[in-house]
Amino acid sequence: MNTQIEPAIARGLRATDPEHDRNPHHRIQAATVRQMCGGISDMTLWRWLENPELDFPRPIYIGRRRYWREAEIIAWLEAREVAA
């Protein structure tokens, strides 16, 4: 398993579990976002960002690197589970 993923996520815990703290300040890189979203490609991630209907969380740019707030990605994934 990818070692960049938070330990709680690696154990399969959801953000609603009290053991998993949704730190709104924790930033994750694109590779971790792609892994959390099922191992998607960078092109798929780009398509999700360009599709306003999906409302995928926007990245934060630091230099030329993209980072996402982990809590926003988890919330988006959970919302997709409920809608499915």
Image: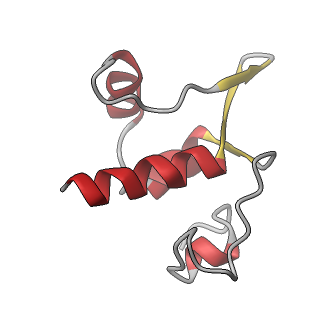
With 73 as the anchor, is 45 left or right in this view? Answer: left
Q: Residue at x 40, y 32 (%)?
A: 45
Q: On screen, 22 above or below 60?
A: below
Q: Nearer the viewer, residue 63 or 21?
A: 21
What is the image's colouring? secondary structure
Q: Is residue 57 above or below residue 76?
A: above
Where 6 sits versus 27, above or below? Answer: below
Name the residue furthest left: 84
Would residue 72 be visible to someone looking at this image? yes
Q: Compare residues 61 and 19 and report the one nearer the observer.
A: 19
The mark total stands at 0
Residue at 28% across / 59% down in the picture?
A: 82
Residue 39 in view here: no
**Residue 19 point in image, percent of width and height:** 70, 82
Residue at x-position 54% and y-position 79%: 13
* 33 left or right, relative to 22: left
Percent x, y for residue 73? Answer: 53, 47
Drawn side of residue 62 relative to residue 84, left or right = right
- Where residue 20 appears, as percent x and y from the top left, is 68, 74
Which image quadrant is residue 27 in? top right
Instruction: State which quarter of the image contains the C terminus.
Output: bottom left
Q: Quadrant of residue 56?
A: top left
Q: Residue placed at 68% from the left, 61% from the top?
A: 4
Q: Position of residue 49 (x, y in %)?
A: 41, 23
